Image (spheres, rainbow, N blue to C red):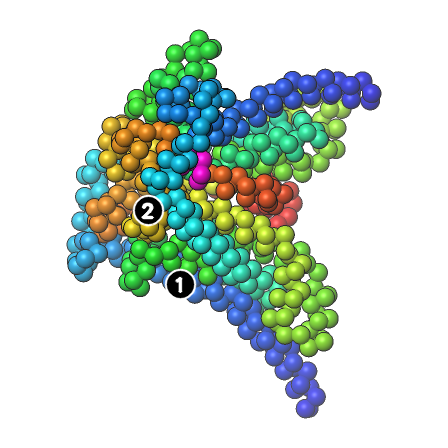
Amino acid sequence: MGREAVTVARPSARARRERNAGLAFISPWIFGFLVFTAWPIIYSAYLSLTDYDVLTDPSFVGLENYERMVQDPQVSLALWNTLQYTLLQVPLYVLVALALALLLHQAGRASGFFRTAFFVPKMTPPVAVGVLLLLLFNGEYGLVNEALGALGIDGPSWTTDPDWIKPGLALVSLWSVGAAVVILLAALQDVPVELYDAARVDGAGWWRRTRTVTLPMISGALFFVTVVNTIAAFQMFTEAYSAYFGAGNSTYANDAALFYVIYLFREGFAELHMGYASALAWLLFVVIMLVTAVQLLVSRRLVYYEGEQR
Amino acid sequence: MTAATRRRRWVRVPVLVALVALTVVFVYPLVWLLSASLKPRAEIFDNRLIPRHPTFENYLTVWESAPLGLWLGNTLVVTALAATTVTVSSALVAWGFAHYRFRGRGPLFGLVLATMMLPGAVTLIPTYLIWHQLGFVGTNVPLWAQNLFASAFYVFLLRQFFLSLPREPFEAARLDGASEWKLFWLVAVPLCRPALVLTFLFEAQASWTDLMRPLVYLQDTATFTVPRGLKAVIDQFGPGGESQWEVVVTASVITTVPMILLFFAGQRYFVQGIATTGSKG
């Protein structure tokens, strides 16, 4: 009887020890999650219903901030700017990343060198990218327009013409495409060679092999790059802020570069409208979640995952 | 077969030409920036690769007109703290999720993954208010202290590595009476060193290049990090200010060079690490 009790109790004692050890190891994250994720989300939902300037206590105003948001022309401007930029930047970025990865994949042993060359710009701090944008895309003296001029094209005023500000930012974002290229190249290198051989035996040319073998096989990585980049594009801040905003910087066409997070940042930290900025943050949260959910739904139809590999 | 390989070799020539051209496009802006920093003001926009009148004067001017040495020091401290704390804490948490079985582990790890998708803008204001309450606004604490509590992306990354370790050595060491802490510190950590170096390097880059948090938390010029300082330099000497581009350009070079050095020091880790993140997504 005593022996039986021991053998029954033993695994549960072990399980308890294992649980305690596991919880002890993950406890920093649990604490961090509660304090720096869960609480901020709840607290910002509350703040979005208040008027709060940090100096005096928040006063409850109900849905006033949300009503104000609907009427605020700056909100619709910022949302529209952000949407335009995202629609322009994400497809461009993913296509260029894919093209570069396909090219690298053809390069054989030399691909390592070029991969490094494409990756290095990614290390540049985004503030410095903002500086490069202002200099290289300068309408009169910039290198980009000089290069276009050599091709007989009269380049636009990228940094001052409101219609060209977003294309300029999207183009400069391509400069840090390196990380996405590395991800896609790794996926390409994982495609089994036999699939290509089989397709070649069937007489498939390069384009058909790419369309029917390569793209389906790397669709998981393509989807990853698209989703991550969409979320980032919606939160565009640093490059645009350092190039077009800041103290005493009013000579530029700020309106065309007023992205949503820039507006949120200014409302919160320049105007100290913490309640209103929290409402803005919640709208962004909902928009990003919806967009991500739609992308997930679409991906169910388009993305091919090999087996149930995790 | 030989005909096919020969044909493939011919295909490779235009591919290599295209890649060389693209490499020039990708690397040229960095070279342009460096070259511009060595030119006198009037020649910045001449777009020549080799400066006509090369000079180090811009570096002296920048050094005199902005406390760059101080900013570099500040950034170094923040970066070292941010990268060290996040590596240690994320390794602990990742090990907890990878090695131990307990009830609720699956849903909790799902929560870790979910927080990776959370837009940073959502928690920006409440997090500021937390640091404001604690009296840390204006210090460098908000720039790194959250890293004490692990970061979802690195937990995910390191867990992948820990999962690939065989279990037997741990069971054996446990029978020998090793404590759980010792198993982690003396067995698991040394086996996953590359992944830990990778985490450190990634976070060092993220921390060094960050502008948003220094903008929110730092007010006194003496506490600035280099990107925050560069933004101040742009405001003072850039388009809206005195239009002294040579100062802006040179400060940009000084902000960027440490990251280029970091990349070449850990090149292997950066490229390998990023390749893994995609394949697990």
Question: In this orientation, which residue lies closer to the viewer: B159 or B12?
Answer: B12
Q: Nearer the viewer, mark 1 or mark 2?
A: 2
Whether residues under marks 1 and 2 lie with C-beta atoms below 8 angstroms apart, the answer is no
Image position, residue A242 (x, y; %): 34, 36
Q: Name the mark on residue A144.
A: none
Q: Taken as a whole, is the magenta stretch helix, strand or loop?
A: helix
Quadrant of the image containing the N terminus of chain A: bottom right
> What whole-number distance in Å separates the C-alpha atoms at marks 1 and 2?
25 Å
On the image, the x and y values in percent for residue B104 come to: 52, 65
Q: Residue furthest bottom?
A: A2
**Does the stretch in magenta take in A22?**
no
Query: Residue placed at 62% from the left, 66% from the top?
Result: B185
- The answer, for residue B135, to whether it is visible in the render is yes
Disc number for residue B215 = 2
Q: Return the residue found at the far right.
A: B2
Q: In which quarter of the image is residue B57?
A: top left
Q: Residue at x 59, y 52 (%)?
A: B197
Answer with left or right where residue A252 lies relative to residue A139.
left
